[in-house]
Amino acid sequence: MSNMICFNHKSDNDGMKDDLNMSNGGTSMFVNILCLSGGRLAETESQKRFMVFLAEKNQNVRGLGNVGFYIVDMPWDRNYFDEDKTFMLKVIDGARHKHGWETLGYEPNEEFVAEYLDKFQKLVERMTAEDILEESLTEWLSKADENDPVRCGFPKCKIHDTYISIHGCQVCMD
């Protein structure tokens, strides 16, 4: 089993070869290092939503091989697109610079980290405001109940300094 991060629902047919395919272990590591970096960088509500979205990609909850997603389905908001895209690129750079790694109980494989982050960066760089699917943010938020972190102040893990999802801290659960 593996997980895919693709640009959009038509990525298989668009001729681009920048999709990211990861093993289950690689996916957990990838999500962890993005959450660690973003937990230290997110300031705005929109940026915090991105980090909760990523924290929801928890295989312990959703099942192995079930946390892939499309870049266009991330919680993009046209009002904050440029800032959010810049933020996501900073999160990737922070993961490259090992922001928060000292809180992990393991040392990520730097070869895999570099490959995954390079491909993810290409997918994020490819995103434009015209690609935003307005319904993605609306649908994602509509599924959040009153106890969901996106509805109750974006709490963080005291150990890892990551934004948590409704399931808790991605890194603690890994």
Image: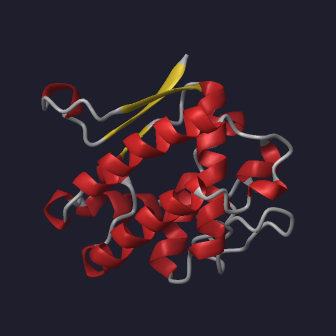
Q: x and y percent of residue 117 in the render?
A: 47, 45
Seen at 31% across and 47% down, the residue is: 123
Q: x and y percent of residue 101 in the render?
A: 75, 54
> 116 above or below 97?
above
Q: How is the image coloured?
A: secondary structure
Q: x and y percent of residue 72 in the render?
A: 29, 52
Q: Quadrant of the C terminus?
A: top right
The answer to whether residue 165 is seen in the rendering is no
Seen at 25% across and 74% down, the residue is: 78
Q: Quadrant of the N terminus?
A: top right
In the rendered picture of this protein, how many numbered marks are placed on residues? 0
Q: Who is closer to the viewer here, 9 or 13?
A: 13
The answer to whether residue 87 is seen in the rendering is yes
> 81 above or below 43?
above
Asked where in the image residue 163 lies, by quadrant, the reply is bottom right
Asked where in the image residue 150 lies, by quadrant, the reply is bottom right
Seen at 77% across and 41% down, the residue is: 107
In the image, taking residue 20 as reference, residue 163 lies left or right, namely right
In the image, taking residue 72 as reference, residue 63 lies left or right, namely right
In the image, taking residue 173 as reference, residue 71 lies left or right, namely left
Asked where in the image residue 144 lies, by quadrant, the reply is bottom right
> 3 above or below 132?
above
In the image, taking residue 143 as reference, residue 76 lies left or right, namely left
Q: Who is closer to the viewer here, 143 or 162?
A: 162
Seen at 79% across and 62% down, the residue is: 160
Q: x and y percent of residue 41 in the render?
A: 58, 74
Q: Who is closer to the viewer here, 117 or 134?
A: 117
